[in-house]
Image (cartoon, rainbow, N blue to C red):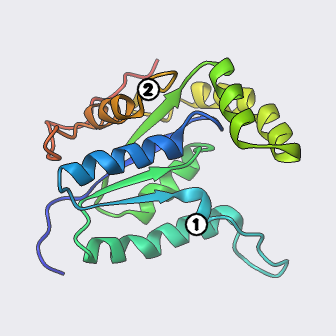
Amino acid sequence: MPDLPAARAILLTGTVGSGKTAVTIAIGELLELREQPYALVDLDWLGWVEPGPSSRLTQRAVLAENLRLVWPTFREAGVERLVLARYVEDRAQLDEFRAALPGVELCVVRLVTTQAVIERRLRARDSGSQLAEHLAETAEFAARGEASALEDAVVDNGDRPLAGVAAEVLAAAGWNADGGLASGPARREHA
């Protein structure tokens, strides 16, 4: 593989309805404007599986393994910036993601917004049992995310333009406006 600049990744996390996928796409649009080689991955799709009863792999293990397998392909394609979206369950899962991306600096950004905004988003996109399930999960996921404090930064994704949220995420990760790096991610101090 040719010499490539150091690879950096952002993992957007947050409760269901916090806007992870929408912000991931908005970041991609900003990186496109900057002509920055990038890849966007909604990690839910890499782990949407029901393993067979005789499988040694869990859903989480499949997700981590798939991420480990796709990263070299992105890198060979010249990707320097990787943006991932996924609710992170715990530190062990975050460690699985880091292990799947050797040599990649990973900045975790948790998206937050009000319960009212989340409910409005979910009602606009989901229906039936999926809506009921997501409405039931959102407060629990938000509380667990707050308690686990796995993130390096927290960004509000309420009723704001997505481009502004995306720019704030990039700044929190230490990515300059031109796509380069600042001195490093703006790390959140954990209590």
Question: Residue 147's spot in the image, x, y percent?
Answer: 61, 25
- Is 115 or 70 nearer to us in this picture? 115
Q: Which is more N-terminal, label 2 or label 1? A: 1
Q: To which residue does mark 1 refer?
A: 46
Question: Residue 134's spot in the image, x, y percent?
Answer: 77, 39
Q: Which mark is residue 116?
A: none
Q: To which residue does mark 2 refer?
A: 154
Residue drawn where x is 26% and y is 65% of the image: 79
* 118 left or right of 67 in image: right
Kind of element beneath mark 1? helix
Question: Residue 100's spot in the image, x, y percent?
Answer: 44, 65
Question: Residue 125's spot in the image, x, y percent?
Answer: 70, 42
Residue flagged by tag 2: what amino acid is it?
Val
Residue drawn where x is 60% and y is 31% of the image: 145
Q: For the residue carrying disc 2, how many other residues have a C-alpha within 10 Å: few (<14), some (14-19), or many (20+)? A: many
Q: Quadrant of the N terminus?
A: bottom left
Q: How many marks?
A: 2
